[in-house]
Each structure stands twice: as structure tokens, then as C-alpha cells.
Image (tube, grey):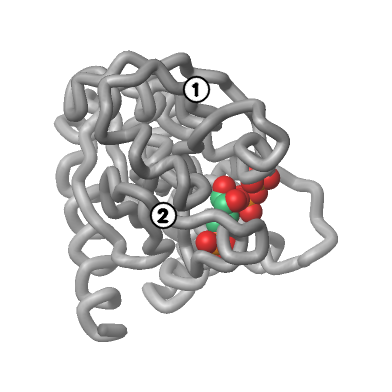
Amino acid sequence: MRYLTFALAKGRLAKKTLELFEKMGITCEEAKDPDTRKLIFTNEEHKIKFFLSKASDVPTYIEYGAADVGVVGKDTILEEGRNLYEVMDLGFGKCRMCVCGPESAKELLTKNEIIRVATKYPNIAKDYFNNTKNQTVEIIKLNGSVELAPIVDLSEVIVDIVETGSTLRENGLDVLEEICPLSARVVVNQVSLRMEHERILKILDQLNNLIQNEK
Ligand code: PRP
């Protein structure tokens, strides 16, 4: 039997996913070592491998078939726009993609003004302003701490993830518009879904049962 490979977005999503697999009886002792720098873990009994990759690379591994199944946030799926099947909402990692800024920027979103939008998600921001709002904007790509941008006048607003809202609050910013809800999703390579249909469906079914019980 060939290995079924899973690409997990490093961090909280991978941790939560490995916990779910453990409950399914698919354990990975090595992965539990908090000091490990290993990126691949194998379960020989079930012939499963787990890769830990940067979240934004998960859709790439899946599209090319380097991994069969992935767990990654909806934000990354939308931003990367890769060819893959999104097959399940795992229901954890819930947050929202929003347009945020100072309250005073709200009116800039109602007029057809050209404004600057700073974001780690240029494709999501472009799609929202061009296609949903029909507003011409200048997108400024940043790599983190995006909340700084309106404070230092790099941009009028930002497009970013809001979870608890505390980063916004502590920096005097508000949610101005909601773009979409986000959560962790299971994605599958298009060929793998056909070739490994039974094994993948069995795992999805077990995951689904666990998630329903946790609700
Ligand atoms: C994310 C996001 C917000 C923050 C939202 O950033 O970009 O900044 O979390 O969470 P909150 O609503 O609970 O405050 P992350 O921690 O990933 O760091 P980064 O901004 O450096 O990418």
C-alpha cells in the first residue's frame, strides 16, 4: 500500500489536526515533541505521512500532488487560488476576513474614491474591491502586523483576519466591512480523490464523526 500524505499548515491548525488523528487511533509520537524541528512524520501502521508546511504552501503541495490531502485555512485557499477540491469544513480556526480601519475611513468605502488597501491577502482584497464593491483601489502587499498600516498612514484601510478583535481594539481600529467567514478546511488533490477514493473517504468520514461529537 502506498503512503497517503497529508500537508498540514504549521501551527495551531496542524496541532489540532494531529489531535483529531490521535483520537482516530492514528498516532504520531514524534510530532508531539514540542522541540522537534522535523517536518515529516510517518505512521507505519496506517501508511500515512504528515508534512508540516507554511500555510500558504499547502495548496501548492496539493495541486501538484506532492501531498494527497491538506488542512489549511479558507483564507489561504482563496488567496492561492490553486486547482484542488475543498471537501470539508473542520469548523475550528473560525475567524473572519474583514476590511478594517479607523471609524473615519468608513465613508471612504461608500464613495467611489481611490483608496489604499494594505494586506497580506492581495488577491482576496482585489477580488472584493473590484468585483463585489466595484471600487478602484491601490493594493499594498504586506507580510504581517498589517494593523500598523492605517496608523502610520501607509493606507486608509486594511484587509485582514479578525479573530477575537483584540489586535484591532488595541490599535484603535474597527471592522468596517465583513468579506467572508473563515475556518480550517480539508483540501484534496484532484487525482488522489479518484485514485485513493476509499481511503480518503474513510478518513473524512472519521473526521466528520469526531467533529460532530465535539459540537
Ligand atoms: C492575525 C491577523 C491579525 C490577528 C487577528 O495575525 O493578521 O493581526 O491575527 O487576531 P485577533 O482578532 O484575535 O486579534 P497573526 O497573529 O497571524 O500575525 P501577523 O499579523 O504578524 O501575520
Identify the residue at horizontal 25%, vertical 57% (top origin): 89
Q: The N terminus appears in which quarter of the rendering?
A: top left
Q: Position of residue 82 (x, y in %)?
A: 33, 21
Residue occupied by mark 1: 116
Left/right placement of residue 118 relative to residue 130 reads right
**First in sequence: mark 1 vs mark 2:** 1
Residue occupied by mark 2: 175
Residue 41 visible in this rendered orientation of the protein: no
The residue lying toward the viewer, choosing from 85 and 206, is: 85
Q: Position of residue 24 (x, y in %)?
A: 37, 73
Tag 1: amino acid:
Arg
Residues tagged 1 and 2 counted as in contact (Cβ below 8 A): no
Does the beta carbon of the residue at mark 2 sit less than 8 Å from ligand 1?
no
Identify the residue at horizontal 18%, vertical 52% (top origin): 201
Residue 5 quadrant: top left
Question: How far, Cα to Cα, is label 1 from label 2?
Answer: 16 Å
Q: The C terminus appears in which quarter of the rendering?
A: bottom left
Identify the residue at horizontal 22%, vertical 24% (top origin): 191
Q: Residues within 10 Å of mark 1 (few under 14, many from 20)?
A: some
Q: Position of residue 154 (x, y in %)?
A: 65, 26
Q: Position of residue 53 (x, y in %)?
A: 60, 38
The residue lying toward the viewer, choosing from 110 and 208, is: 110
